[in-house]
Image (spheres, rainbow, N blue to C red):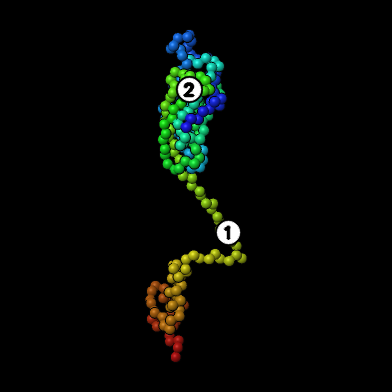
Amino acid sequence: MQIRIGLAGLLIAALAACGGGGGSDDAPTVGMQSPSISATAVQRNPATAEITVSTRHFGEGQAIYFELVGGRALLSDFEAGGDFGDVAHMSVTLRNDLPVGTQTQALTLHACGDAACKTEFRGSPMSLTLTATVTPNIDVAAVTSLQRTGADPAPTADVPVTETWAGELLATVGEGMGAGSFEVRTGSYCDRCPSRRSCPLHERGQQVTR
């Protein structure tokens, strides 16, 4: 993919470049400051990465047209514009339909003296590698608080009562209370037991039936 910027990719030198004269060593020169760029995005959300190019021996008011080649699989836009001094800044935008994961792609950046990019400056074209990382977009459900008053009915239980510790305890007590006889057990609490006067194991226990 060629993202041809035209006037949107036009950068104008703001300051006279270092050096002077008309020798070949003073020819306008560009250079990639970093051979790789990276961008990290959350799935279905845009993200950008910056490209920086060094610029030397450009006269004040001199224009650079940038053309980016490659990137159709990862990029949706390329922007450059405004003034530059010793460094020109551009940005690329990742597509918002990229899948989760990390992908890399080789790009080529041309720096030209005309909009048709027929004349390139020294150092052009420049190669760089784009690494795009997309992380999952996790939707977190809102927390709903349970509020009820004494007049509201109690919420229904998803777990049967008999499968809870309280249900098991009630079942055991119910079975004992409904039986025709009770198992008598002694312990440290016998002196305080309200049934000690009718307990056969207690020394003061008496028969309660005839």
Whether the residues at callouts 2 and 1 have beta carbons within 8 Å, the answer is: no
Is 191 situated left or right of 114 in this image?
left
Residue furthest right as drawn = 151
Q: Position of residue 19 (x, y in %)?
A: 47, 11
Looking at numbered disc 1 in the image, what kind of residue is underneath it? Gln
**Foreground residue among 100 and 201:** 100
Mark 2 → mark 1, Cα distance in angstroms: 65 Å
Up/down of 27 relative to 172, above or below: above
Residue extending farthest bottom: 210
Q: Residue at x 46, y 26 (%)?
A: 109
**Identity of the residue drawn at 61% across and 65% down:** 151
Q: Residue at x 45, y 74 (%)?
A: 171
User: Where is 13 relative to 98, above or below?
Assistant: above
Instruction: Kindly indicate the quadrant of the structure image that contains residue 203.
Output: bottom left
Q: Position of residue 110 (x, y in %)?
A: 46, 24
Foreground pick, 183 / 55: 55
The tag on residue 13 is none
Reading the image, the residue beneath label 1 is 147
Q: Residues within 10 Å of mark 1 (few under 14, many from 20)?
A: few
Q: Report the residue marked by disc 2.
A: 111
Classify mark 2: helix, strand or loop: strand
Whether 48 is drawn above or below 158: the answer is: above
